[in-house]
Image: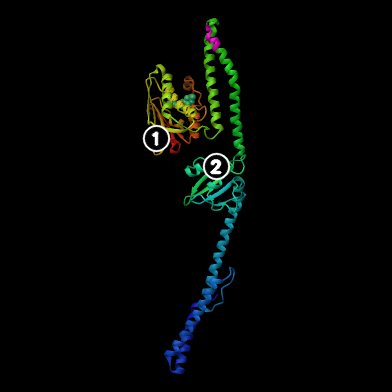
Amino acid sequence: MNQNWHATLIRHLLVLISLCLLGGLVSGEYGWSLAIGLALYLGWTLKQLLRLHAWLRNHQPDEAPPDGYGLWGEVFDSIYHLQRRDQRVRGRLQAVIDRVQESTAALRDAVIMLDSDGNLEWWNRAAETLLGLKTPQDGGQPVTNLVRHPRFKEYFEGEHYAEPLEIPSPINDRLRVQLNITRYGNNEHLMLVRDVTRIHQLEQMRKDFVANVSHELRTPLTVIAGYLETLLDNVDDVNPRWARALQQMGQQGARMQTLLNDLLLLAKLEATDYPSDNQPVAVETLLKTVQADAQALSGARGQRISLDVEPGVRLKGSESELRSAFSNLVFNAVKYTQEGGSIRIRWWADAQGAHLTVQDSGPGIEAKHLPRLTERFYRVDSSRASNTGGTGLGLAIVKHVLLRHRGRLEISSVVGHGSTFTCHFPSSQIVTL
Ligand code: ADP
């Protein structure tokens, strides 16, 4: 490269002007001589410009620019260096992208990038084996066309991605996959898919074990409870020392029976995603019977149980499941509220969906317990709960029933003032008369 191109340029211009002046001296026409000199220079400059233009338009990736002279040589060289530097940077970036793509391709988890409309942009090899995506045909396709499970469509369109979704793989029913969606950038989605078949099988084994044990215990317990009942019916014939023991055995037997029934109900709820019967349930009538049962349970404790229902709002689902859930909430309120307390049941619908609230004036629950209340066998105060005869499974049943009806449970409580349990159901579950 000519480092001294400033000096060269000035020298050339001086030579040109001198030649023009010489021409003028010889011909006597200074003006014409200068004009011809400048025109020649302009012509040469234009020619260089055209060469540069032709090279910029048609050059091959590694082709050097044409040789130039003076300032033009400098311009050609600078463009060439700029281009080489650009190529080197691009090469380095490509190497980084290649490494990222190689490592994600080697991942056993599927990584899928979706645009803001949910169309496939990029995915790794594991996405082909776990979800059956085909490269490159599926590029640009909506993901809901390729993963057709109804729960996935609902989950994807619902846009609440805090909890992962578990579904069977679209290409192999025996594979169980867990999907995690994260939003990034301009509402694009990154979807991670993990094979959780093994964990699912272990979970299934646990559920089957509990269900089988509960089922197997039911028959012997029924026999024992039957004999106890007979003995209690004829308590006068029994040695008086045994009367109290028999009574307690009867009570504990009944408790074990409710426990087994609750465990079996939970196992049944866990076996499928949605209830098999999806009829409109008359919530109003259902709540009236629950209120009457709660009043009977309350007995002499004098609690006021009020019911406030928006008529004509029905819910799609299983009547027996909803009855278990609602009565668990209302019976809990009766069990844990002191004598003379009040319990308010409300059922209404608004733009967000339908809601059932069970509000009591009981002792309330400390905030630290609230997130764990729906866990199986979780009790705030085990001594108090065993007095009430609860199984510790009631709220777990409520949570499962709500999940199966696309609903969710919200619990709020102020210690000393009472608790409010609210079931929220989406508008899609409502049938209005
Ligand atoms: P349980 O059969 O023991 O009632 P649940 O799952 O129904 O089991 O409830 C779990 C725990 O939540 C209960 O042991 C109780 O401590 C607490 N709880 C539930 N409902 C209420 C309520 N209305 N007021 C106060 N505590 C409640």
Gap between marks 2 and 1 measured at Cα: 29 Å
Task: State the SS at label 2.
Answer: loop
Disc number placed over residue 149 in the picture, else none: 2
**Amino acid type assigned to the residue bearing label 2 in the image:** His
Residue in the picture at 43% in, 90% down: 32
* Earlier-in-chain disc, 2 versus 1: 2
Screen quadrant of the N terminus: bottom right
Q: In which quarter of the image is residue 224?
A: top right
Residue 203, image quadrant: top right
User: From the image, which quarter does the C terminus lie in?
Assistant: top left
Residue at 45%, 94% in the rendered image:
27
- Please indicate whether residue 14 sits to the left or right of residue 127 in the image: left
Is residue 226 in view from this perspective?
Answer: yes
Measuring 53% from the left and 68% from the top, which residue is drawn there?
82
* Residue receiving disc 1: 349
Q: Please report the bounds of the magenta region as a residue range.
A: 229-235
Magenta segment, prevailing SS (helix, strand or loop): helix
Q: Residues within 10 Å of mark 1 (few under 14, many from 20)?
A: many
Residue 303 appears at what percent x and percent y?
Answer: 38, 21
Q: Is residue 136 magenta?
A: no
User: Could you tell me if the residues under marks 2 and 1 are in contact, i.e. CB atoms within 8 Å?
Assistant: no
Residue 333 picture location, percent across and down? 42, 25
Q: Nearer the viewer, residue 11 or 152?
A: 152
Work out whether residue 389 or residue 127 is closer to the camera in this orientation and state it. 127
Q: What element carries label 1?
A: strand
